[in-house]
Amino acid sequence: MIHFNYQTPLRIRHIRQLKAFLQELIISEKHTAGPLNFVFCTDAYLLKINQQYLNHHDYTDIITFSFSEEKQVVSGELYISVDRVKENAKRFNVPLSNELHRVLFHGVLHLCGYNDKTKVQATQMREREDHYLKLFSKRFT
């Protein structure tokens, strides 16, 4: 089950289809979908989480916490800074919905085992994000 929770307002189009697509992404990555909670929040809210739980003092667009005890089950809580997503959409000159979807897919891919710490990992992560962005946009835009 996928839940969207709002600490700050955000209008998301195609919510039902987006949630179904996130489930499809998990299955296509050969995992099983467990409970996922997405929390859309402000920079300040996410910075506090970043400092408290990760001892990082930077703004970020997403923080992902896995709750799964089984490697193949994708379950967790994903905190997304709406402020960062909006700023990055402007910075990269892409529609807000595109950047939001990229961040959503990015977080789920982390829960599927992808990392982005090295250049090679970041490239692979970007390729998977792009793949799912194209699939989603073909269906729903």
Image (cartoon, rainbow, N blue to C red):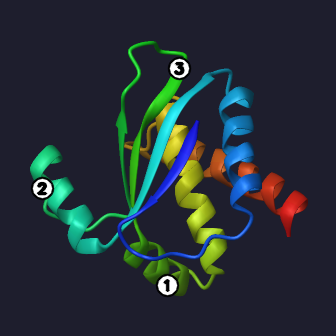
Q: Nearer the viewer, mark 2 or mark 1?
A: 2
* Mark positioned earlier in the residue sequence (2 or 3): 2
The three-letter code of the residue at mark 2 reads: Gln
Specify the quadrant of the image occupied by residue 53.
top left
Q: Secondary structure at mark 3?
A: strand
* Picture residue at 10% right of the left edge, 50% below the top: 52
Check disc 2 and report the residue beneath it: 51
* Picture residue at 45% right of the left edge, 45% below the top: 37
Furthest-right residue in view? 139
Check disc 1 and report the residue beneath it: 91
Quarter of the image that includes the N terminus: top right
Specify the quadrant of the image occupied by residue 104.
bottom right
* Picture residue at 73% right of the left edge, 49% below the top: 132
The residue lying toward the viewer, choosing from 62 and 14, is: 14
The answer to whether residue 77 is above or below residue 6 is above
Q: Position of residue 61 (x, y in %)?
A: 39, 64
Q: CA distance from mark 2 to mark 1?
A: 25 Å
Specify the quadrant of the image occupied by residue 77.
top left
The three-letter code of the residue at mark 3 reads: Val
Q: Number of labelled discs?
A: 3
Q: Position of residue 106 (x, y in %)?
A: 53, 49
* Mark positioned earlier in the residue sequence (2 or 1): 2
* Side of 136 where 55 appears, left or right: left
The answer to whether residue 72 is above or below residue 93 is above
* Side of 18 where 108 appears, left or right: left
Task: Confirm whether residue 114 shows in the render.
Answer: no
